[in-house]
Image: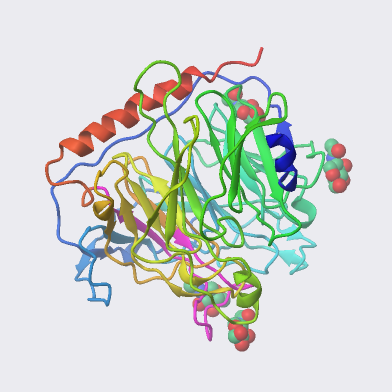
Amino acid sequence: MAFKKMSFLCFLVIILSFLKPTSETHHHLRHRLSAAAPPRISSNPATSSRFQPHISSSVLFHSTLSLPTTSHAAASGGGEWSLLQESIGVSAMHMQLLHNNKVVIFDRTDFGPSNLTLPPGQKCRNNDEALKTDCTAHSLLYDVASNTYRPLMVQTDVWCSSGAVNSNGTLIQTGGYHSGDRKIRIFEPCDDFNCDWVELNLNLTVPRWYASDQILPDNRVIVVETTDPKEENNLYPFLHLLPDGNLFVFANQRSVILDFKNNKIIREFPVIPGEKRTYPATGSSVMLPVKLTGDGFPAVEIMVCGGARGGAYIKATQGKYVKASKSCGRIRVTDKDPNWEMEDMPMGRVMPDMLLLPTGDVIILNGASKGTAGWECADDPVLNPLIYHPDEPEKEKRFSVLNPTTIPRMYHSSAILLPDGRVLVGGSNPHVRYNFTGVKYPTDLRLYGSDSIRRSQPQSGSGSSQRFREVQRALPFYMHHMRDPQ
Ligand SMILES: *[C@@H]1O[C@H](CO)[C@@H](O)[C@H](O)[C@H]1NC(C)=O
Ligand SMILES: *[C@@H]1O[C@H](CO)[C@@H](O)[C@H](O)[C@H]1NC(C)=O
Ligand SMILES: *[C@@H]1O[C@H](CO)[C@@H](O)[C@H](O)[C@H]1NC(C)=O
Ligand SMILES: *[C@@H]1O[C@H](CO)[C@@H](O)[C@H](O)[C@H]1NC(C)=O
């Protein structure tokens, strides 16, 4: 019966099978524990190299400026922003950390020139949608340790694509737009300067656009596209692989557990109260730290935050920006009869990025307080990140507001957790092309690091180190379930 009710949510699923998985996995979670420092913004303009054909080491110069005072009075949670690069030449729409502490960054290819030139001698891309011959890069490899980068060549349009890293550490990026919509591209990490995007001589059987990808226990990657003809798209579903090997899938306001081995929906959860949560009403989600208590599979809790009201996208395209969702919901998907437990963030947010930190806390950053995802569809950026403490018993104490950035991170911005505990933040381009002048939210090419962990710990420290231990203990559990398919 639950299956029938689910017919509104049409899952289009492909499983890509890749050869020869290795058991090698990489977990580089290091914890940065240092004494609390006063908030500061450091910048290193000396390293704002626009183009480097090779990664080279460079000495960073840090100057310390005092933070401008802002209207966000409650920024008591700390946090520190530092400028890493004044321009990386590409707006960081997508970022993926690799196991060797390098980050693959990319944007669309169909908007005209980026601000990053391909190295001399590199073949230009021909017959692009916007340019006949495009000699600029739309992707780059950023080396965290040396704070340097080099351009990469992505052949077909990765706009609206999705990706996952397989167990040998290779990024597999699927689908996209135009000539890219059935492509499978891989990026194998290297420690010299030779690795670049490789397109496989193999197509997806159907085009994939705004899908989400997830590595599976047998090292295959699942590509899930959700759609609901009655609603506004509901693209880029939230996926979380559960300890029992099934897949949690969330789209719009609904969620299910998919048994992908038998292509069967085995559970449907209650509708999350409040607003819509997936593109263009873009919210975000995390799986909270798994608690290894009791026998059998541990309890798993998923948290979803932000989003926008139904109809907000249409209104935004008419220049009317509706207030974004303030609410977050938590659901314990392993319970017999689970329900969403709702709570409010200190401010509303659409297009947030949510990351689980090594402390077991969640950081929520980027995005806007009005409108939706989409070109020119949002207003009023939210500059303060939030930290959410999932284990704090008193609801009122769960959120802390961190120090604000000065840079709006609107549509097509991104954030990832780095191995040293910092959060890398980049991108923002709500326009069809790159536009740096005469617009309210110029295309942003700057790369920032945000250090939120050292200032987000409870004073006593014991709670946080306990949470950290739980995260560490949770990791081998997942590895245990990664076995070879044959
Ligand atoms: C890693 O996986 C990719 C994708 O399946 C494959 O092309 C590559 O050869 C693998 N590399 C190693 C070192 O096993
Ligand atoms: C990007 O390049 C354009 C054209 O050369 C230039 O006008 C603009 O200032 C550059 N933007 C940045 C942020 O470097
Ligand atoms: C993949 O699709 C492209 C474009 O449709 C086509 O030109 C190419 O031959 C296909 N490749 C394979 C291996 O099927
Ligand atoms: C940037 O946007 C403004 C306002 O829409 C427009 O007048 C200008 O032509 C755009 N610039 C570029 C380079 O597209």
Question: With respect to residue 351, does 337 lie above or below?
Answer: above
At 24% from the left edge and 48% from the top edge, which residue is drawn? 394
Q: Quarter of the image containing the C terminus?
A: top right
- Which of 204/284 is in front? 284
Write down the quadrant of residue 303 in the picture.
top left
Magenta: main secondary structure:
loop
Question: With respect to residue 3, does 383 lie above or below?
Answer: below
At 23% from the left edge and 50% from the top edge, which residue is drawn? 456
Res 193 visible: yes
Q: Which residues are magenta?
A: 426-453
Residue 107 % position (x, y):
60, 58
Task: Give the left or right position of residue 86, taking residue 122 as reference.
Answer: left
At 30% from the left edge and 35% from the top edge, which residue is drawn? 30
At 57% from the left edge and 71% from the top edge, which residue is drawn? 430
Question: With respect to residue 426, does 484 lie above or below?
Answer: above
Is residue 45 shown in magenta? no
Residue 330 % position (x, y):
43, 45
Res 171 visible: no
